[in-house]
Image: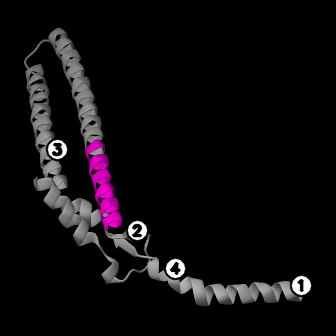
């Protein structure tokens, strides 16, 4: 009885692989995208990077002002009496704590802002890729980072990037 079942399974597998699999494979359309390259070359990413850099430079200027104040206060220490030095040192310590808090808040704020921008851009890339896949009858689009091999003809990175940049200009 087992031999009959095995024979039947093998016969079914042979029939499926010769009759149905080629038809299914013909319908299968797979592409891949280099998401990192799309992200880096997307004009919105470049514009957002410039904005974040400007904000970072502005924060650096504000930080430099605080550092300058601390240096000035330290320079004043030499000419003060011992009692005045203690008060001044307390003020310097407070200013240093202020600088440390400023640094931490700035880093956290800029990191959160960058993370939000990255999330939005990656969402846009995903949406454009999905729309492109639907319009062009793709079964699936893969991120090239999970590929061990992919023929160049299946790489749609440039097409996705072109769509993103053309829609961004609008």
Viewer-nearest of labels 4 and 2? 4
> Badge 4: how crowded within 10 Å, few (<14), some, or many (20+)?
few
Q: Report how far apart the C-alphas of labels 4 and 3 lie in the structure.
A: 48 Å
Marks 4 & 2, CB-CB < 8 Å contact: no
Q: Report how far apart the C-alphas of labels 1 and 3 lie in the structure.
A: 69 Å
Residue at image point 22% right, 61% down: 40
Quadrant of the image for the N terminus? bottom right
From the viewer's perspective, is residue 72 above or below residue 123?
Answer: above
Q: Position of residue 57 (x, y in %)?
A: 11, 41
Query: Does the magenta-highlighted stretch encompass residue 123?
Result: yes
Viewer-nearest of labels 1 and 2? 1
Pointer 1 residue:
2
Which is nearer the N-term, disc 1 or disc 2?
1
Secondary structure of residue under mark 4: helix
Marks 4 & 1, CB-CB < 8 Å contact: no
Residue 107 found in image quarter = top left
Pointer 3 residue:
52
Residue furthest out toward the right: 1
From the viewer's perspective, is residue 37 above or below residue 61?
Answer: below
Marks 2 & 3, CB-CB < 8 Å contact: no
Q: Report how far apart the C-alphas of labels 2 and 3 lie in the structure.
A: 30 Å
| Label disc, if present, on residue 24 of the rendered structure | 4
User: For this rendering, which residue is in front, 36 or 24?
Assistant: 24
Secondary structure of residue under mark 1: helix
Residue at image point 31% right, 82% down: 153
From the viewer's perspective, is residue 109 above or below residue 90?
Answer: below
| Label disc, if present, on residue 25 of the rendered structure | none
Q: Main secondary structure of the magenta part?
A: helix
| Label disc, if present, on residue 142 of the rendered structure | 2
Which is nearer the N-term, disc 4 or disc 3?
4
Secondary structure of residue under mark 2: strand
User: For this rendering, which residue is in front, 75 or 46?
Assistant: 46
């Amino acid at each position: 009885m087992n031999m009959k079942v095995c024979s039947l399974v093998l016969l079914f597998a042979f029939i499926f692989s010769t009759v149905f699999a080629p038809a299914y494979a013909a319908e299968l359309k797979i592409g891949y995208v280099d998401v990192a390259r799309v992200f880096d070359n997307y004009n919105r990413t470049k514009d957002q990077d410039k904005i974040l850099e400007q904000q970072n430079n502005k924060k650096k200027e504000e930080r430099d002002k605080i550092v300058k104040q601390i240096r000035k206060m330290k320079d004043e220490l030499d000419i003060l009496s011992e009692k005045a030095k203690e008060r001044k040192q307390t003020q310097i310590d407070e200013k240093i704590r202020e600088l440390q808090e400023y640094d931490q808040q700035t880093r956290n704020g800029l990191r959160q802002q960058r993370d939000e921008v990255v999330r939005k851009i990656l969402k846009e890339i995903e949406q454009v890729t999905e729309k492109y896949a639907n319009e062009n009858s793709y079964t699936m689009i893969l991120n090239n980072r999970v590929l061990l091999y992919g023929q160049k003809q299946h790489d749609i990175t440039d097409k996705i990037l072109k769509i993103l940049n053309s829609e961004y200009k609008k």
